[in-house]
Image (tube, rainbow, N blue to C red):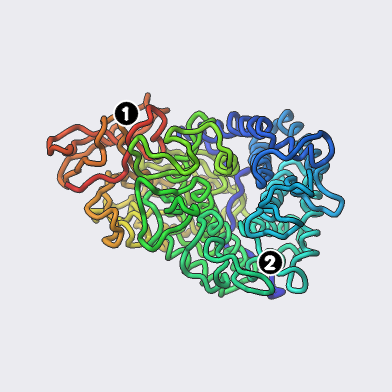
Amino acid sequence: MSSQISDYPIEAVGFARVAIDDVFWKPRIDTAVEITIPYDFEKCEETGRIDNFAKAGGLMAGAHQGIYFDDSDVFKVVEGAAYALQIAPNAELEAYLDALIDKFAAAQESDGYLYTARTIDPDNAPEPCGPERWSNLRINHELYNVGHMYEAAVAYFEATGSRKFLDIAIKNADLIDSVFGPDGRRDVPGHQEIEIGLIKLFRVTGEARYLRLARFFLDERGQSNGRDVYGHYCQDHAPATRQSEAVGHAVRAAYMYAGMTDIAAIAGDADYAAAVRALWDNVVGKKLALTGGIGARHEGEAFGEDYELPNLTAYNETCAAQANILWNQRMFLLTGEAKYIDVLERSLYNGFLSGVGMDGRSFYYVNPLACDGEYRFNRETSMARQPWYDCSCCPTNVVRLLPSLSGYVYARGEEALYVNLYAAGRADLTIGAAEASIRQRTNYPWDGKIEIDLTLAQPATFALRLRIPAFAQGQPLPSDLYRYLDESADASILKVDGEEVPLDIRDGYAESRREWQGTTRIELRLPLLIRRVSAHPAVSELAGAVALERGPLVYALEAADNGSGLRDYALQDAAPLHAEHAPDLLGGLTVIRGEALDASGHKTPIKAVPYYAWGHRDVGEMTVWLRRG
């Protein structure tokens, strides 16, 4: 690895400096902080996940409970809780975390090793753990677990200033660094995640060894240096920089692609940059569900072949949507191109948000695009939202993203301020040497009117870049995987201090470069049209099918509004459709109403709700795609 260390050319404005106070996201963020985080900790206690640390530390007796990678669930909730502390101090929560970290410290072996499934009873560890340390990395999540620990430890350190958890993570990372490397053990984790965690440790400590180790685990993929490679399922079939097709387990893949993007930026590595661009092109051009979900197959929770995009049997794990968001954010920071935020937004509003119930206590592991009311997921859970899972990676993952969501709204580059997501709220930041504040007012995604007051303490010259979403430019995605039947688009309108200005769109952003001073009012109007969507002809399951979108939201029909037989409904191209806001439905949302033809060819009224809102009422049929009449 080159000794040169650089970084992303664009920096996200940290979530602690941005406050969202809109009617769409703020209730979901508040629910995550006030309900889901305590609920997840409660479930981790009930299921023995937390007791496992006490048992490993000799604080209580008993055998290991649960799955061998359950340590990671606890770490993920701690990370989310640490983000919550950065939003607002909470002495009770901080005391709870402090006591929990004491259990982590007790569970850590003297040389830094931390893996409760082995430490509790090394001679009788669960079979997937392998007979000794590092002996079954393809399966055992030994390195995956601690990757989540590193992320949580960094978040806790940034929230509290305490090194208590960070020192545990550093001790473990130092052990792993002493074992693995070009002159040591040459192997890779079957489930990627440690790479991201190591890079976060590198950032907070400045210790380049952690960056080198992260790169080692990526460079070593597909290399049979004294070991058997783990194949496509683990993205271990070829060197990372020679991979151009997304294959295997979707969460593992997207975590790896995020780590590869980090290396492309920090090491200035052109080969890694070219690889993640090629992989992104493959995903967005051939393997992305309309909802932004990834991972078509239940078997292996995996990507399918190109254009394999099923409906009823689609997997689209919630964790995979979250991983896709993490990856696309990094791709934007690397390139400054809005197309990556377009994909991020689609995944956020649809494929991710559908995975967590509005009550904060019910979840979807899998997010199909159709439901017949009977089909069951492979984890033997019904189509009803579930309070928990034996494998609860998804319920514990959502609390990492929602409290930190405001960190995706703004970014800054060299003499540029990016507005990526539209959500009412405030932000304080610096542009160059100038202090600035932003006040955004909008009812997005229900309304396309956005008002931004930009206030500078002293004059400064820079470019303000407002993302013009792909849907406002006449296409669902920055690829030909989907298209609007009506390709025309009402133009977006931009005003600065009441004066309309031409839209100068560069890399997906309307750019205004000037000397800014005092307070400037920026008004942007995005067209939120009801659009009919069709898929690429190569997507055989979607031949002759049509779906509905409005703004960033994909819509679905549910039996609760429309009765049964939904997948036999046909929507005629000329059938009128209109949007109607329903303030009392599921916290307030905009529905689409119109008429379709039922199986007998008779006209019947239809009502579509945003896809994220499905499954909150009676469990019955649902479909995103209709026959095109």
Q: Amino acid at mark 2?
A: Asp
Foreground of the two, 546 or 441: 546
Q: Name the kind of residue labelled 1 in the image.
A: Ala
- Which element type, helix, strand or loop, lies under badge 1? helix
User: Eyeballing the image, is 32 above or below 366?
Assistant: above
Residue at image point 64% right, 43% down? 67
Q: Is 178 situated above or below 250?
A: below
| Residue at the (21%, 40%) spot, across then down | 569
According to the picture, the residue beneath numbered tag 2 turns out to be 187
Side (left or right) of 623 relative to 116: left
Q: Position of residue 158 (x, y in %)?
A: 72, 46
The N terminus: image quadrant: bottom right
Q: Nearer the viewer, mark 1 or mark 2?
A: 2
Category of crowding for the residue at label 2, using alpha-carbon neighbours closer than 10 angstroms: few (below 14), some (14–19), many (at least 20): many
Closer to the camera, 344 or 515? Answer: 344
Mark 1: few/some/many CA within 10 Å (<14, 14-19, 20+)? some
First in sequence: mark 1 or mark 2?
2
- Total numbered labels placed on residues in the image: 2
Residue 112 appears in the figure: yes
Would you say 345 lies left or right of 177 here? Answer: left
Q: Which disc, if any, is residue 280?
A: none
Comparing 607 with 361, the one in front is 361
Q: Position of residue 427 (x, y in %)?
A: 57, 43
Q: Which residue is the extreme one toward the top?
A: 584
Q: Is residue 580 shown left or right of residue 149? A: left
Name the residue carrying label 1: 560
- Note whether residue 418 is visible: no
Per the model, the C-alpha gap separating discs 1 and 2 is: 51 Å
> What kind of element bears circle 2?
loop
Where is 220 relative to 313, above or below? below
Q: Give the percent coordinates (x, y) of residue 144.
A: 66, 54
